[in-house]
Amino acid sequence: MMMGLLAFENNQGLWNGGYYSQFFGIGGVMVTVAILWLSTGYFGGIGAPFAPYFWPYLGQVPKKKERQRPVRVYMDGCFDLMHYGHANALRQAKLLGDQLVVGVVSDEEIVANKGPPVLSMEERLTLVSGLKWVDEVIPNAPYEITEEFMNTLFSKYNIDYIIHGDDPCLLPDGTDAYALAKKAGRYKQIRRTEGVSSTDIVGRILQTFKHKEGVSENAGVESCDQMKTQLSNFLPTSRRIMQFSNGQAPSPGARVVYIDGAFDLFHAGHVEILRSARQLGDFLLVGVHDDQSIREKRGYPPIMHLHERTLGVLACRYVDEVIIGAPLEVSRDMITTFNISLVVHGTVVEGGSASEFDPYALPKSMGIFQVVTSPKTITSVSVATRIIDNHEAYKKRNLKKKASEDKYYTQKKFVYGD
């Protein structure tokens, strides 16, 4: 009995890697050929049906799988005052397929269903196209998924599924904008990102800049006493930051480009300057200033707090890494730590108080500083000014939208997803 066990162990040892030396030489080649012939019909032989039972570790030669068409998913939206909630929705949508096609609702449709948009179609297209998860963009998409447009998505754009969040999207008559897609069985739902919405941001702006004359490109606001900041409901987590991050370090010898700023109310101007900066190197490192530094520099706090602004920057396809709460001054230690090859700054600067302090003095002295022409003149203050100038229209829009949002939170249930 003991001898039998030893013999079994010795045979098993043959495949566990202990006796490969027995196959060396001409005899080993002959045995290998015989094994292949018996188990798979290799060299045109007839495979023995019982061979796999004797040679369990060899397996069968895998068959080549046919290449399948990528799954294409569609998600639409107004994407007005683009924020990390929009970005996270598109990130989740991309996880449900291989290619993400995004429809950007036209200005006319937004006016008819929600109220006047803050950003133009061109600006909203720039923002959506600049997100790392978006593969294709359809401009001037309808607000309602009609039967005609749904068939166009299926036939022309090869869309497999239409995606939307768990919050209701209702037409003026109270019906579901995605009813047809649900009926067709081509609808999938994602989880809404809590703590932010365009309605919420408009409310923050209206409360922060209480008086229209308080907003200017130079000093920003009359005084901090005239402002009231609405607190964000966003609860930042390390998981969310990881989901937005590329998670990759620069390769050895990579040219690291650094650009910093507040990146408040992330807009089309931010996307374009980040694109320009990325083209100057192999790896784009972005410094996002903390809330207190921005307040001291501009005289008023940012609309979006640090973690919200960080997610907005991380979602941009041109950004590789972010320094969260970066100092205003670019120091030698920072340059050495991150192996920065070039420090860049745009020609369009957010309003701030006059100061003799130059945060870029060191990179200038080192000859690694470059001014990049900002492709767009839009700023966070100019975006806020559009809302202030149309205060009554946006206040009315917010009251209408707030009612539906309050109803959503009252009836809200847990939805699986991230």
Image (cartoon, grey):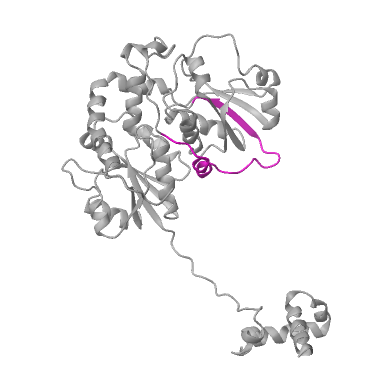
* Residue at x 31% of width, y 19% of height: 388
x then y, percent, for residue 275: 51, 34
Res 239 visible? yes
Q: Is residue 94 left or right of residue 58?
A: left
* Residue at x 83% of width, y 77% of height: 21
**Quarter where residue 60 is shown:** bottom right
x then y, percent, for residue 89: 40, 44
In this picture, is 149 found above or below 268? below
Question: Which residues are the magenta region?
Answer: 234-262
In the image, 344 versus 293, the foreground residue is: 293
x then y, percent, for residue 409: 30, 40
Q: Is residue 403 left or right of residue 323?
A: left
In this picture, is 164 found above or below 213? below
**Quarter where residue 82 is shown:** top left
Quarter the N terminus occupies: bottom right
In this picture, is 60 found above or below 409? below
In the image, 7 versus 119, the foreground residue is: 7
In the image, 23 versus 414, the foreground residue is: 414
**Quarter where residue 279 is shown:** top right
* Residue at x 27% of width, y 55% of height: 181
Q: Is residue 269 magenta?
A: no
Res 41 visible? no
Q: Is residue 261 magenta?
A: yes
